[in-house]
Amino acid sequence: MTPTNAATQPKPTVLFVCVHNAGRSQMAAGYLQALAGDRIQVLSAGSAPKDTINTVAVAAMLEEGIDIATNTPKILTDEAVQDSDVVITMGCGDACKFYPGKRYEDWQLDDPAGQGIEAVRPIRDDIRARVEALIADIAPAA
C-alpha cells in the first residue's frame, strides 16, 4: 500500500453562481482563493452576467485585503457545473444548472447590487463565514 498525501489527491473544484456574477459569487470566489490557496480550484459564473464587477463589492473586499477588481463576470455553462465537485448557488433561481452527483448548496444572501458599502459589509462577512466553513469541510488544513 502506498501512502496518500495532499499533493497526490485531486483538489476539489467549487463553483459559485449568482445571477450577475458581479457581487456575491465574486466575493465568495475571492475569499475561497485567498483562504484556501491552491487546495481548492475556484470557479464563478452567472446566469445573466453583468459587464463588470460591482464596484461596492470590490471596495468591500479591498477592506479585507482581497482585490477582485480585475475579475470578469462569466456566463454559467454546463461544462463549469460538470467540472465542479461543489456548486454553491446564490439566488440564481431556475437558471442554475443541476446535475446528479454534485454537492449543491444554496446560500440565501442579500444581493449587493445597488447597495452602499454599509449594506454590503454584512453580506461580505456572511460570505466569509460560509467560505471558512466550506474550506473546513472539503479541504481542511493538514
Image (cartoon, rainbow, N blue to C red):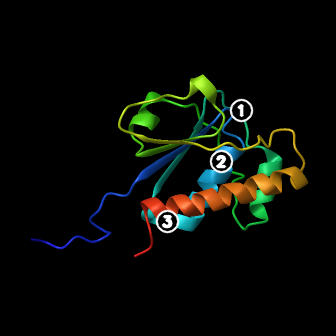
Residue 110, how many percent across, how many down?
Answer: 76, 42
Q: Provide the residue designation for mark 3.
A: 136
Location of residue 16 (image quadrant): top right
Residue 122, how many percent across, how many down?
Answer: 80, 56
Tell whether 83 sits left or right of 76. Answer: left
N-terminal-most mark, 2 or 3:
2
**Mark 2 nearby-residue class (10 Å; few <14, some 14–19, many ≥20):** many
Q: Provide the residue designation for mark 2.
A: 26
Tell whether 116 sits left or right of 34. Answer: right
> How far is mark 1 from mark 3, CA to CA?
31 Å
Residue 109, how many percent across, how many down?
Answer: 71, 44
> How far is mark 2 from mark 3, CA to CA?
20 Å
The answer to which of 109 and 60 lies nearer the viewer is 109
Type of the residue with mark 1 = Lys
Location of residue 108 (image quadrant): top right
Residue, far left: 1
- Residue 71 appears in the picture as rendered: no
The answer to which of 64 and 3 lies nearer the viewer is 3
Residue 6 in the image: above or below residue 130: below
**Mark 3 nearby-residue class (10 Å; few <14, some 14–19, many ≥20):** few
N-terminal-most mark, 2 or 1:
2
Type of the residue with mark 2 = Gln
Q: Nearer the viewer, mark 2 or mark 3?
A: 3
Residue, far top: 94
Tell whether 120 sits left or right of 85. Answer: right
The answer to which of 125 and 68 lies nearer the viewer is 125
The residue drawn where x is 64% and y is 39% is: 90
